[in-house]
Image (cartoon, rainbow, N blue to C red):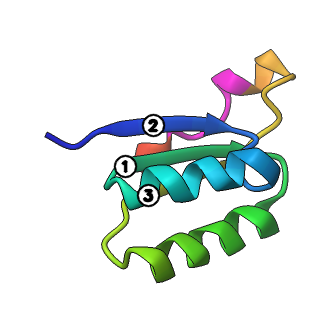
């Protein structure tokens, strides 16, 4: 069974490092962050670390709750 982790603010700082640690342990990774460029760079780094990574990036400001209901699901990507 695949383990899944959801990390907010995961494209930079400690969140980014958590992503790398979970990636090394074969987790499916769902990451929320404000900046798409950082999410893209993180995805490239995770794929370099583990080519078969299942990585879903969601560019969203979670401090704006109304946006949660209008954004696509990570499964839609």
Seen in the picture, residue 1 relative to 38 is either above or below; the reply is above
**Cα distance in 3D space between marks 3 and 2:** 10 Å
Instruction: Kindly indicate the quadrant of the structure image that contains residue 24.
Output: bottom left
Q: Quick one: quadrant of the N terminus?
A: top left
Label 3 vs label 1, nearer the camera:
3
Q: Helix, strand or loop at disc 3?
A: helix
**56 or 46, nearer to the observer:** 46
10 Å crowding of disc 3: few (<14), some (14-19), many (20+): many
Q: Helix, strand or loop at disc 1?
A: strand
- Where residue 2 appears, as percent x and y from the top left, is 22, 43
The stretch drawn in magenta includes residue 72: yes
Seen in the picture, residue 27 relative to 69 is either above or below; the reply is below
The stretch drawn in magenta includes residue 26: no
Q: Which residue is mark 1?
A: 28
Q: Which residue is mark 2?
A: 5
- Work out whether mark 3 precedes mark 1 in sequence or the reverse, and give the earlier one: 3
Label 3 vs label 2, nearer the camera:
3
- Work out whether mark 1 precedes mark 2 in sequence or the reverse, and give the earlier one: 2
Discs 3, 2 touching: Cβ within 8 Å: no
Q: Which residue is mark 3?
A: 23
Tell whether 11 sits left or right of 57.
Answer: right
**67 or 17, nearer to the observer:** 17
**22 or 64, nearer to the observer:** 22
- Where residue 47 appears, as percent x and y from the top left, is 47, 76
Seen in the picture, residue 23 relative to 51 is either above or below; the reply is above
**Cα distance in 3D space between marks 1 and 2:** 6 Å
- Work out whether mark 3 precedes mark 2 in sequence or the reverse, and give the earlier one: 2
Discs 3, 1 touching: Cβ within 8 Å: no
- For the magenta stretch, what is the residue range? 68-73
10 Å crowding of disc 2: few (<14), some (14-19), many (20+): few
Residue 7 seen in the figure: yes
């Amino acid at each position: 069974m695949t383990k899944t982790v959801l990390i907010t603010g995961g494209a930079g700082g400690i969140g980014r490092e958590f992503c790398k640690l979970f990636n090394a342990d074969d987790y499916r990774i769902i990451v929320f962050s404000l900046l798409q460029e950082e999410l893209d760079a993180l995805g490239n780094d995770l794929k370099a670390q583990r080519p078969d990574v299942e990585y879903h990036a969601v560019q969203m400001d979670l401090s704006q709750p109304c946006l949660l209901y209008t954004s696509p699901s990570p499964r839609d990507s």
